[in-house]
Amino acid sequence: MSRLVVVSNRVAPIDEGKQSAGGLAVAVLAALKKTGGIWFGWSGDVVAAPPSAPSLTPVGKLTYATLDLAKRDYEEYYNGYANSTLWPLFHFRLGLTNFNRRNYAGYQRVNALFASKLAPLLQPDDMVWVHDYHLIPFGEQLRLIGMGHRMGFFLHTPFPAPELLVALPNHADIVRALCAYDVVGFHTTTDLRCFINYIRFEARGTVTERPDGEGYFINAFGRTLVARSFPISIDTEPLVTLAKQAARTRQTERLRESLVGRDLIIGVDRLDYSKGLPQRFESFHCLLENYPANRGHVSFLQIAPPSRSDVPEYIAIRKELETLSGHINGRFAEFDWVPIRYLNKSFTRRSLAGFFRVSAVGLVTPLRDGMNLVAKEYVACQDPEDPGVLVLSRFAGAAEELGDALIVNPYDIESVADALQRALTMPLDERKARYNAMMEVLRRNDISVWRENFVTALAGAPYDS
Ligand code: F6P
């Protein structure tokens, strides 16, 4: 079997206890642990003079190969083009999208640099699986230096509607770079449709449904590739077990005691404007206004570890949330009850599993999100005999599979407050029925199915005849 070489900007910390809240690292680690291989990417460090070769750390069957970034590369590639241009655009936020040629050149430069550092580590039969928007040109750069490997790309964010994508000055270069891969994967059929529409109507390529129904053949920019949706998932059974154990830890017990019989609503997100946190806080505010019986009886725990804190839009959203939570707590708090517990720090997976289990409602309301694994994790962590209710944005990729959540429009503050009230008062039979239906989905499509489907599609390459 071919060796798998995974490439992503963010590589999970080698010490798993220190896992960050990003869904990509968690999912890729779960996928790679079983197969082994190489995981190549940024070390997370910014240094004056990066070493010329990647640092190699073997852990079991897996070898981490990581590179430091120079300050200028960090600014132009990571803070700049990746997180001030592509991230907002891919989340449909044209108003927040900044473009300049310097950052675009930095993005291309780092992709070329990374490709040149991976190339010497490759064996002829390796399959290269590149992840996310930071590294779209990576495959094209590898091909430019003569690497003929099978190469796949998976996008962890939404793919924008072509009407938005064309606002990007270099949109054709970005899509041409995607077409340098053999397989391009998206979370949802909606993202896939956006890509296909671009290929048909902007790139004037052809799109043909595959005879086996597994996605489409794309002919564009002189290449043939497969485009398909592969909904990412969680390592379901181990998480179910972890949550059962975590239900009894001292930390979970402390959370339970602190509630003194009150219901808990929980949200866990990177502090990011795509997550809809101001609207979520407003919805909780509205719940307390419109359904006053909840005052003193329901608490909302929002965990939001800071993210990309050098990017101005992230500094702004952090300030906004501090003001909003302070305002809501000032308006409603009592001497023995605080409505919103707002925490800017991260927790281990074990802690989160225990917190999810204690929470009557999981509130996941992004304005736009690739998949949102927190939605899936919340469900998997519930007690089957007394499960909580997931309130889920229709704009999270997870809504395509988790139709048994209470699906909401996060922009409609009052209707989210109504859904919260419905969740808090939902009879046990209905909670169990919804939980069982969602668990059936999570058991059928877990992280190994995602990995196997993608790797099988990639193993069938090349699709160029
Ligand atoms: O899951 C989407 C994603 O953008 C990943 O690519 C990324 O690693 C994660 O969110 C966290 O963001 P960052 O790496 O910028 O901290």
Image: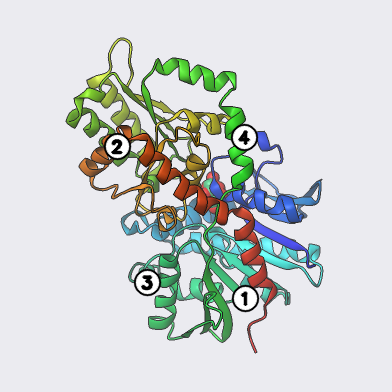
Foreground: disc 1 or disc 4? 4
Mark 1 vs mark 2: which is more N-terminal?
1
Q: Position of residue 289 (x, y in %)?
A: 19, 29
- Mark 4 — residue? 242
**Tag shown at residue 182:** 1
Q: Position of residue 8 (x, y in %)?
A: 62, 56
Task: From the viewer's side, name the closer residue of 70 and 395.
Answer: 395
Task: From the viewer's side, name the closer residue of 36 and 66.
Answer: 36
Task: From the viewer's side, name the closer residue of 237 and 109.
Answer: 237
**The disc labelled 3 sits on which kind of residue?**
Pro
Q: Position of residue 103 (x, y in %)?
A: 49, 59
Q: Are marks 1 and 4 in contact (CB under 8 Å)?
A: no
Foreground: disc 1 or disc 3? 1
- Mark 3 — residue? 162
In the displayed structure image, the side of residue 136 where residue 313 appears, left or right: left
Is 220 placed above or below 2 here?
Answer: below
Can residue 75 be seen?
no
Q: Is mark 1 within 8 Å of ligand 1?
A: no
- Mark 2 — residue? 420
**The disc labelled 4 sits on which kind of residue?**
Leu
